Image (cartoon, rainbow, N blue to C red):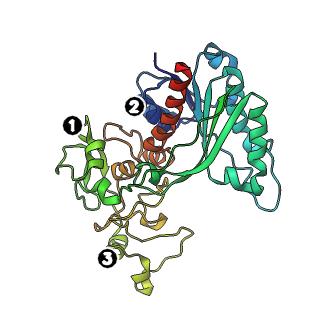
Amino acid sequence: MRPTVIDLFAGVGGLSLGFEMEGFDVLIANEYDQSIATAYIENHKKTKVIVGDITSFDLNKVFGEYVDKVDVVIGGPPCQGFSQKGKRQTIYDERNFLFKYFISVVELVKPRYFVMENVPNLLTAEKGYFFNQIEKLFNNLDYSLRAGILNAADYGVPQNRRRAIIVGKRLGTAPKLPKAHNEKVTVWDAISDLAFLESGEGESVQEYRKAPESEYELKMRKGSTMLYNHIATKHSMVALQRLSLIPPNAGKEILPQEHITKSIYSGTWSRMKQNEVSVTITTRFDTPSSGRFTHPFLNRAITVREAARLQSFPDTFRFIGSKMSQMKQVGNAVPPLLAKAIAHVIMNDIKRDNND
């Protein structure tokens, strides 16, 4: 019998997919955004999806049937209240109320394990004061914790993406977080086989034009016969002129003064570097002015499919809805290969316990 999972604050299901890859069954997931939940449903057909705001739920009605019957609760509850400088925040800060619902479901369901994913500052804010509060809350529920900041690039994901990961185990010692891999996957390892579209080109469904050129691309294309979500942003003439002035591996530092724009983002008007891992994918990767999201040599930002490849979503995973929703689905997701690495250490721990 396969171990079972509940996914809270699920988004499009990057965490779910990683656990599924490792042999878990995701029984139920919750996502409040209807368009993103629709994409989750499209890609996780065996999972029951509850669409809506968890704060409006009767938790006993929704999750009561899973008490003592689920192995893992996973999720990334938003926590903003601990990041403010100059004022010590607590777990009870009003901006952290969603976090309390994650704890409430864990307390109700009593899973053997839980996995919480969040921003790195969760562990470091106020010299660890905030995390210490979290640890006490879970210790009181009989969970031991392991916590650390993991970079997705260390687990086969072609992207620098640092996330705080907390793993808890009930009535036992939590397993160690996964060890980093040595081999890095580059931007070009991830997207070199995708059609070289110009600005405004592409179809929502199209045939592959090139053969895979790396092991990573072979892995991403496994089971896929058509290419989805590979449509290039149609940029303005001014943007195209600006991009045409930027050679590979360069950025706005080479632009003439009349093309310099102010931005709060680092890496604006800069090309992705073919032979390095990507910068962190955000929800605005279609805009060169939002970060280092310009194709290594084509005069356009990366497509949804290219961003999905850099997040380690396989080509069989389809993003649906408006372009803005698709970018949220990709940019806010936990990379599936990072999730798989976390799921692996939990699966091994379950097997050890079952053999004892």
Q: Is residue 49 visible?
A: no
Cα distance between the residues tagged 3 and 1: 34 Å
Please state which amino acid type lies under the numbered disc 3: Pro
For image coordinates 50% across by 37% down, the residue present is 15
Quadrant assignment, res 8 = top right
The circle on residue 43 is: 2
* First-in-chain label (3 vs 1): 1
Q: Which residue is mark 3?
A: 247
N-terminal of the pair, mark 3 or mark 2, is: 2
Regarding mark 2 in the picture, which secondary structure is present there?
Answer: helix
* Pick the front one: 61 or 200: 61
In the image, 104: left or right of 273? right
Q: Position of residue 193 (x, y in %)?
A: 23, 53
Q: CA distance from mark 2 to mark 1?
A: 16 Å
**Label 1 is placed on what type of residue?**
Thr
Mark seen at residue 240: none
Considering the numbered disc 1 on the image, is that residue within a helix, a strand or a loop? loop
- Name the residue nearer the viewer: 1 or 49: 1
| Mark 1 Cα shell of 10 Å, populated few (<14), some (14-19), many (≥20) | few
Residue that mark 1 sits on: 225
